[in-house]
Amino acid sequence: MYKIYFENRYIELTNNKNNNKFELYYYSKIKNLKTFIKQFIKDGKTHNIYIYHENIDILVKDFFACFCLVDAAGGVVENSENKILIINRLGRWDLPKGKVHKNENYKTAALREVNEECGISNMKIIDSMPTSYHTYARRGKNILKRIFWYKMKYEGNEKLIPEKEEGITEAIWVKKTKLNKFSKNTYQSLKIVFKKIR
């Protein structure tokens, strides 16, 4: 599933035209797709839309080509008390993540970002999580950020140190049963990751 968030709205890319609840757009040409996306961004009234093509790989490739693609990676970190590490960045609850450096693989980037943003080390990746997608505009360009998430285990007891230079004001451990409270003040694209935390 490819669900790309535009703030609180999303476009879902699909190869199943019978399984949708919203408007269905049939993809044919990339030129038309670019126009369609621009209109969707401009028109804040249209909520969620499905874009259909029988070949999902072609659809994804062409959709991504309409944006400047930025790859990032992050961690869903669980400690020895089965609590999850979350951060408050710019007034919203988030998970530690950041851009993948040139010649850096996604797993290494995810571990590095958790270390830099929260001050802890020696996490172990134990599984992958759903990839999230969201868009934003910067300097007149439409950016599509693709975030590769990894489930991590942390057995240490280092003090959490939020990276203030990145707008992070808090880094805390939260019981899984309390996550729903924090997910109410997070990004729509991140809610799918929060829902997968067990």
Image (tube, grey):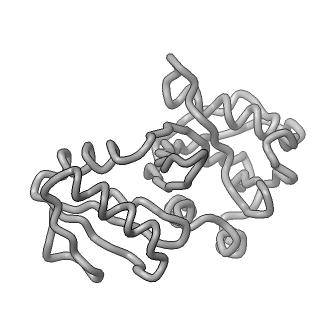
Q: Residue at x 69, y 54 (%)?
A: 84
Q: Residue at x 46, y 69 (%)?
A: 42
Relative placement, left or right, of 2 versus 113 is left
Residue 106 rendering spot, x and y as whole percentages: 50, 30
Q: How many marks?
A: 0
Residue 173, quarter of the rendered image: bottom right
Q: Nearer the viewer, residue 150 or 47?
A: 47
Residue 24 rendering spot, x and y as whole percentages: 22, 75
Tell me the quarter of the image containing the N terminus: bottom left
Q: Compared with residue 151, is residue 191 higher up or lower down, i.e. above or below? A: below
Residue 53, quarter of the rendered image: bottom left
Q: Residue at x 56, y 30 (%)?
A: 100
Q: Compared with residue 154, is residue 187 higher up or lower down, i.e. above or below? A: below
Residue 4 rendering spot, x and y as whole percentages: 41, 59
Q: Find the residue positioned furthest to the left.
A: 54
Q: Residue at x 66, y 66 (%)?
A: 186
Tell me the quarter of the image containing the C terminus: bottom right
Residue 75 rendering spot, x and y as whole percentages: 61, 43
Q: Nearer the viewer, residue 39 or 7?
A: 39
Relative placement, left or right, of 93 versus 137 is right
Q: Find the residue positioned furthest to the top.
A: 103
Q: Nearer the viewer, residue 171 or 24?
A: 24
